[in-house]
Amino acid sequence: MIFYQVLVNGVVLGSLYACIAVGFSLVWGVLNIINLMHGSFIVLGAYLALLAYSSLGLAPWWTVAVAAVLFFGVGYLIQRFLINRVVAAPVMLSLTLTFGLDLIIQNAMIYFFKADYRALNLNPALGSVALGTVVVPVDRLIATIFALLLTFALYVVLRKSRIGRAIVAVRVDQDAARLLGVDIRSIYAIAFGIGTAMAASAGTLLALTFPIAPVVSYAFLGKAFVVCVLGGLGSVPGAVLGGLLLGLVESFGSYAIGPEFAVMLSFGLLIAFLIARPQGILGRRGFE
Amino acid sequence: MSYAFVRSGLVAARSALAVLIAGAGLGLSGASVHAADVIKFGAPLPLTGALSPEAVKAKQGFEVWMDMVNKAGGIKVGDRKMKVEVVFVDYQSSTPKAVQAAESLITQEKVDFLFSPHGSGAAKAASNVSEKYKVPTVAATASSTQVFDQKPKYLFGTYTPNETLLGPLFPLVKAKLPTLKKVALYTRNDLFPLSLAQAIENNIKESGLEVVFNEKFAINTLDHSSALSQLKGAQPDWIFVTGYINDNLLIRKQMIDQRLQAPVVTMITGPSFPEFVKAAGVAGSENITGAAWWDAAVRYKSDDVFGSTEGYLRAFKEKFGSTPDYGSASYTVAAVALQMAIERAGSIDREKVRDALAKLNVNTFFGPIHFNEMGQADSYSPPIFQLQNGKTVVLYPPSVKQGELHLGVK
Amino acid sequence: MSKFLAIGALLVLLVFAPLSGDAYLVRLGTLACMYAVMAASWNLIGGLTGYPSFGTAAFFGVGAYTSGILCKMGVALPLAVLGAGLLGVVLAAIIGFILLRLKGHYFAIATLAIVELFREVANSATDLTGGGMGLNIPRHEGLGVYQEAAIFFFAMWALLAITAAVCLFVERSKIGFALACIRQAEGSAEMIGVDSTFYKTLVFALSGVFVAMAGGLYASWVHYIEPGDVFDILLTIKPVVMALIGGVGSTVGAIVGAIVYVTFEEAIWRNYLDFSSGIIGLTIVGLVLFLPRGLGSLRLRWRPRASTP
């Protein structure tokens, strides 16, 4: 019976991971930029949710919309004026740039929010639901559902809207897209903005599940990496699959060989995929 | 050929210039003056980075002491009084940086005495520096015996060893729960929690109990659900969780998510801090037991600058408007111990103060302070408490007992 | 010839540090030499070959633990450091063989994952490494503070001299030429007969051996290491920033960058308590955006226009 509990744990955890990673995957796939600030944006979204709840009594699912819009703007500006300058540059340069920017954001967060851990406790608490012997916490369930909804919405936008199709076009073949009249710079900025918006939205929901502090961003970033490699870059369904795979592996692995090896497992899996199937389950080979 | 020569010369010259300018900048900022009537103490603190909440408390602990001492004219050294100054340096929550900070304080700031950085690991690393330079150092928060196992001459720790923390809880629980048999341990893979877990395992063996679950979790684990599901399956009577406040908050939350219940749940660290109750909620924290080296509920009469525990609480409240927790009190008593050693030595000569520390046997607001031959305090019993209705209720030692142990953590 | 002169000038400059009589300055000098070794080593694989490796921290940690464990078993320090270097080479060759088929971002991520993996392994192998409780390396009794500092300084300085010599040799030799070909167009390089696998693995191994030895010295220098201290991503990022400061692709640049960065960070650390990491971040951003070719690209007015390397 514990098998089902571990399975459910894995699926729920995996959905959270997918939520964390989908914006990161988009940016990496479309702009070929690894955005090391991604984790910090998630944490900033969480702080927004904390603030909204403590001062206005707004539950996180209302704050999601605000977070998405606000951070879309932030991301757009950052890309347009800073990241754009290194989009075509060697990998190390863009990595170092986002690293430096992340240092600044981290320092600012510690200065304004202090480094102690804070949790969002809804009143009344959400509790958990039980299906037989399997127990699922309601907040994770809500986060999972929202994550899947957001991800689905993104998928629809990418496939159906004009901007979305332009983004996909740039991802598939930049030069052809340019020839067809797509304004690459503007697409880059929009894609980055979307990535940041997804990160912040994920963060507002994650505030229900994890205690929040500036330093938590690195843990989120680490998971995002692994999910992207597993699932394939720039692919929204890939992020979902990659997240689920990681969640299940960690859940069962922790049960089978012990929780202290959970982190090792995720990075080991990452390396294995990179060697055997770098494009991930669903992705096409990313730019190199 | 000559162009290349000139070019390389320019490269070398530019680099030299850069180094010289930087060095000059260093020189202008670094050196400090040592005033005649002031005793300088060095305090490396993790003012930024993951541990910064601890640094905030530590700084408060030092500041309330500094104020009290300087208000009274300073420390009595022989026949004169000398004021005190604590120099703070940020080691960014990085242990290698803490070592560098210790050396910087000794050689650049020229402090007379040193306090250890926060925690057991960093204290151990930094003690290599203070041992080399022969500077008496007091560690405010180093409880793991591993810190002292190389018998440092100049390092003294005001925390009693981890082994003393939870021992007294066992008979208390046994008395309330005669059917006590199965115990579960869940430990963070880090120096202090591991050391504590080892001590708890010894306690368990001595009490004749059975360990049904014993796992470690990696630092930065985001999800404990699988481990907790397993733990639940083992149906323990008593669960021990050792980690830092963020781990314990997450674990507690996931325990509730998984509807994991047990008669007794003990968590170190976290429950002693008001932030824990705030984050976990009154219901979430109900009946969690914990222990700490001090609690605001203890009452001691003392020969130190505060006069008694109440005196300390008053001074702290006056300065910061709140009640101190053991995070701040630990740093205050480290300073107090050093002060009393200086007074008894009658001088600020490092060897004399070191010997005075080794012989120290005094009453402080924190409890009696005396160090064993390894350098760790062995003179008081850390209070054990339980969170009831959002408040800490002290269960032990009997002299300050405030209430009874309640069973049942939902 | 010119590059050797520049390196020689720098090394001579560094040697003056211990003469100041200030043990702390000597510590800074040792740190600068250590980072210079790491920056120059990274430059081999990252700058010359164009493979962005995050692995520096992995080699450093492996070297630190190898030497630490050997010292604990009673092996003399020079042998322990050599042992660390040996293991570094072997590991680099194995890892390189597996990972060097990846390129660009994927290579970067893979090497990053290696660091994280090694850290967790060190955390778990408690019997060997002390696990989360850290490893104590025996102190050297009978040495004065200043003497010990000076010994470690000269050891690190000597390591830097060797590293610099090897790196310069690689830069100027046929190997360096092959690496440049690989960096610019690997496919074409293969077509004209450059055995890229051989050269890449060779240079990756070289980039690991000196870093591992630096780690080995470090462990004995500080006497206590924990997995999180030595398998720290910052130990990779900082050398990259240093190489950036000096100009990527140049050994001289990497060494200069290391010295400049260490002094700069020290000055910031002393003076700006609350914002030190933010200021460092700002500097990094400024560097990448405005000086991506390093300080060397700041042209002094009377220099004749040279063709860019």
Image (cartoon, rainbow, N blue to C red):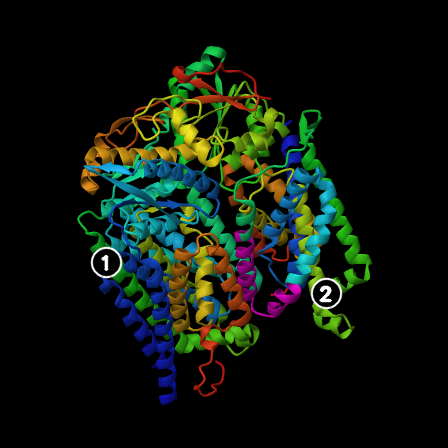
Against B80, residue B400 (above or below) is above
Q: Residue C292 in the image: x percent, y percent? A: 52, 71
- Disc sitting over residue A187 in the figure: 2
Q: State which region is magenta.
A: A79-107
Q: Residue A139 in the image: x percent, y percent? A: 68, 35
In depth, the one of C266 and B33 nearer the eye is: B33
**Residue B151 visible in the shown view:** no
Amino acid type, callout 2: Ile
- Counting other residues with Cα less than 10 Å from the Cα at mark 2, is it few (<14), some (14-19), or many (20 or more)? many
Q: Which residue is mark 1?
A: C151
| Helix, strand or loop under label 1 | helix
Quarter of the figure with residue C18: bottom left
In depth, the one of C274 and B307 nearer the eye is: B307
Dot 1: chain letter: C
Against A89, residue C91 (above or below) is above
Amino acid type, callout 1: Ile
- Disc sitting over residue B337 in the figure: none
Dot 2: chain letter: A
Question: Marks 2 and 1, Cα distance to the nearest angstrom?
Answer: 57 Å
**Residue C308 visible in the shown view:** yes
Residue appearing at x 34%, y 70% in the figure: B20
For this view, does C110 lie left or right of residue C229?
Answer: right
Residue A99 is one of the magenta-drawn residues: yes
Q: Quadrant of the N terminus of chain B?
A: bottom left
Q: Residue C144 in the image: x percent, y percent? A: 19, 52
Residue appearing at x 19%, y 51% in the figure: C143
Q: Residue A259 in the image: x percent, y percent? A: 52, 36
- Magenta segment main secondary structure: helix
In depth, the one of B325 and A102 nearer the eye is: B325
